[in-house]
């Protein structure tokens, strides 16, 4: 049930997808992996939209050089843990939801526990090795993974529905080399917003998702493009998860 | 090409892996779409195919 304050808070969404839709968001637990550039946008919009439980995980502390893009954290937060800073900001945005912020490094050992009670996974990581941990967990638990990544003016996003679409490893079989990536806050804004929109539509069961579609944003030329993805029959992660390849 | 430019190549039949080598592109940094669809690098392509080479970004 939505209380009177919630009905008022979400009135512009309720006229978009009804009280039933809003209740669905309220019942959804979202795991946000990372409280950096993408994690900032994703968590702020998910909190504001009324996802009922948000669990955001990051092992780092806020640095001055984060503040050009990580709008979850403010100048006064420099030196404090990103998890604590995230909790403050998100609870300030929306006290009606439950925010769990954890200072943890995501690993194969702790991922199952971190995901308990979560219905969807938001990828806001800055590296592929951890993304592959999220991918395996999503395949195992059969919950969606909303992938996003950025570099400078460029970004990419796709929606992974286990058993239905290509997984992250099908599309990206190997991790690209680790580099210090340039980052513009507004690029995180574009990609993080796409990920949240996907998550909202998934929960509501409305619209068309980025299923088997890799969306590519180039901010330098202001253009969106997309390429199709497909299950890779030799994907090790799909095989390990016991997902049979569907003929298409 | 990853920088947005286009390039005509005349090859009979070659694997994506070989084509990337020819172009001096590190295969770890890109995914390749053949006629709009991402394919593994063992896949082959000919002059009749359109390849789009997309640089994979990893930041967050
Ligand atoms: Zn796969």
Image (cartoon, coloured by chain):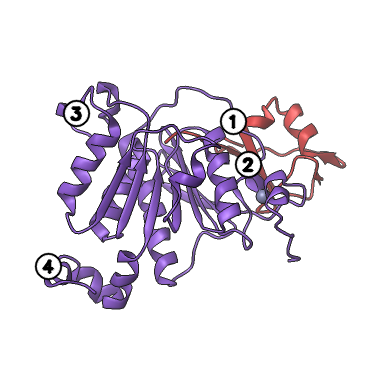
Q: Comparing marks 4 and 2, which lies closer to the viewer?
A: 4
* Ligand 1 under 8 Å from disc 1 Cβ: no
Between the residue at mark 1 and the residue at mark 4, the CA separation in whole angstroms equals: 46 Å
Whether callout 3 and callout 4 share a subunit is answered: yes
Q: Percent x, y for residue A49?
A: 26, 60
Per the image, the residue denoted by label 1 is A176
Q: Considering the numbered disc 3 on the image, is that residue within a helix, a strand or a loop?
A: helix
Between the residue at mark 1 and the residue at mark 3, the CA separation in whole angstroms equals: 31 Å
In the figure, is residue A213 to the left or right of A18?
right
Q: Considering the numbered disc 4 on the image, is that residue within a helix, a strand or a loop?
A: helix
The first of marks 3 and 4 along the sequence is: 4
In the picture, one chain is purple; tell me its letter.
A
**Given contact means CB atoms under 8 Å apart, are the residues at marks 4 and 2 in contact?**
no
* Ligand 1 under 8 Å from disc 3 Cβ: no
Per the image, the residue denoted by label 2 is A172
The first of marks 1 and 3 along the sequence is: 3
Whether callout 1 and callout 3 share a subunit is answered: yes
The residue at the point 19 percent across, 41 percent down is: A88
Establish if A247 lies above or below A86: below
Between the residue at mark 2 and the residue at mark 1, the CA separation in whole angstroms equals: 9 Å
């Amino acid at each position: 049930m939505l209380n009177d304050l919630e009905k008022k808070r979400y009135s512009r969404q309720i006229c978009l997808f009804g009280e039933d839709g809003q209740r669905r968001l309220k019942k959804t637990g979202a795991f946000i992996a990372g409280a950096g550039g993408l994690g900032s946008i994703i968590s702020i919009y998910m909190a504001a939209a009324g996802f009922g439980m948000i669990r955001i995980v990051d092992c780092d502390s806020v640095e001055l050089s984060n503040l050009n893009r990580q709008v979850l954290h403010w100048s006064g937060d420099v030196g404090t843990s990103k998890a604590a800073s995230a909790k403050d900001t998100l609870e300030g945005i929306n006290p009606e939801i439950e925010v769990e912020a954890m200072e943890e490094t995501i690993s194969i050992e702790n991922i199952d526990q971190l995901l308990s009670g979560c219905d969807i996974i938001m990828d806001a990581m800055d590296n592929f090795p951890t993304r592959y941990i999220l991918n395996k967990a999503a395949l195992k638990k059969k919950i969606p993974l909303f992938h996003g990544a950025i570099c400078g003016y460029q970004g990419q996003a796709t929606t992974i529905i286990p058993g239905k679409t290509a997984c992250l490893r099908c599309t990206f079989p190997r991790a690209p080399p680790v580099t210090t990536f340039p980052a513009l806050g507004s690029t995180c804004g574009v990609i993080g917003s796409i990920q949240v929109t996907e998550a909202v539509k998934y929960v509501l069961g409305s619209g068309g998702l980025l299923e088997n579609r890799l969306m590519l944003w180039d901010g330098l030329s202001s253009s969106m493009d997309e390429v199709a993805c497909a299950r890779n029959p030799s994907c090790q992660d799909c095989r390990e998860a016991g997902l049979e390849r569907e003929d298409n | 090409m990853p920088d947005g430019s286009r390039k005509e190549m005349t090859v009979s039949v070659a694997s994506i892996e070989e084509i990337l080598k020819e172009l001096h592109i590190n295969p770890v940094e890109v995914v390749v779409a053949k006629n709009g669809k991402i394919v593994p690098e063992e896949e082959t392509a000919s002059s009749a195919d359109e390849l789009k080479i997309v640089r994979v970004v990893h930041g967050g």
